[in-house]
Image: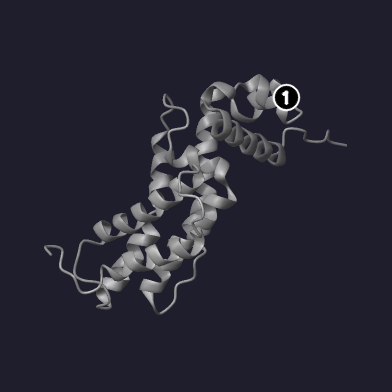
Amino acid sequence: MPRPKTHDDALRVRLLHRAGELLSAEGPGALSLRRLAADVNTSTTAVYSLFGGKSALLNALYDEAFRRFGERIAEVPETEDPVEDIVRMGLVYRESALADPQFYLVMFGRAVPSFEPAEESREAARRTFLPVVRNVGRAVRAGLFAEVPHEDAALALWGLAHGLVSLEINGNLPPGVEVAPMYERAVRAQADGWRGRSRDR
């Protein structure tokens, strides 16, 4: 009878989740393999077995963060209204950040300043942006958006979502703000701003 697997994918996910929490809450100095292993009730041997070291752990954490984020964005259904699809992606952006705040700083905040993701990981991260570009293209071709470079409009829409979500995640919004309706209104206003305007105006 084969021996049970103790260093399995469930443990891998728990380690990545806790690593993200440590980085987000306490900064890079808190993330040691010894502490991580203790917090998850496993051994440093298990961490090395699953990741091979701290640098590989950080890259796996970056990959996992963008994998989760990308899956949520990709699950937004395509409808006959590409502008509404773009708005929905903006809403899912926030939903994803709030669902996994421990990963958000890893994706966009350089949680470990010295860490540089592998190029293939960077490329996978960039691909999460493509559904927005694709829907901007659909909106332009349908005459719903002005004739602008698709990447320009997509980047502006992405940047608005990123800015507001970053303020919220980091606790920098004014007290008493009803975030969800304000956020949706801002995303819709940004999308509407690309209707019928030339890039030179």
The residue lying at 49 percent from left, 66 percent from top is 76
Pinpoint residue 12: horizontal percent, then vertical percent.
Answer: 66, 37
Q: Is residue 60 left or right of residue 166?
A: right
Residue 156 vertical placement versus 196 (above, below): above
Residue 51: x and y in percent read 60, 29
Note whether 61 is above or below 200 in the view shown: above
Q: Could you tell me residue 60's position as x and y percent? A: 54, 35
- Residue under circle 1? 38
Q: Choose between 23 and 114: the one closer to the eye.
A: 23
- Nearer the observer, 111 or 190: 190
Asked which secondary structure carries label 1, the reply is helix
Left or right of 145 in this view: 126: right
Disc 1 residue type (three-letter) = Ala
Residue in view at x 71 percent, y 37 percent: 11
Q: Quadrant of residue 29?
A: top right
Q: How is the rendered protein coloured?
A: one colour
Task: Identify which residue, 41 or 157, lies in the foreground.
Answer: 157
Please report the residue visible at 76 percent of the width from the left and 28 percent of the height from the top: 41
Q: Is residue 95 left or right of residue 45?
A: left
The residue depicted at 52 percent of the width and 50 percent of the height is: 97
Query: Which part of the image, by quadrant, shows the N terminus?
Result: top right
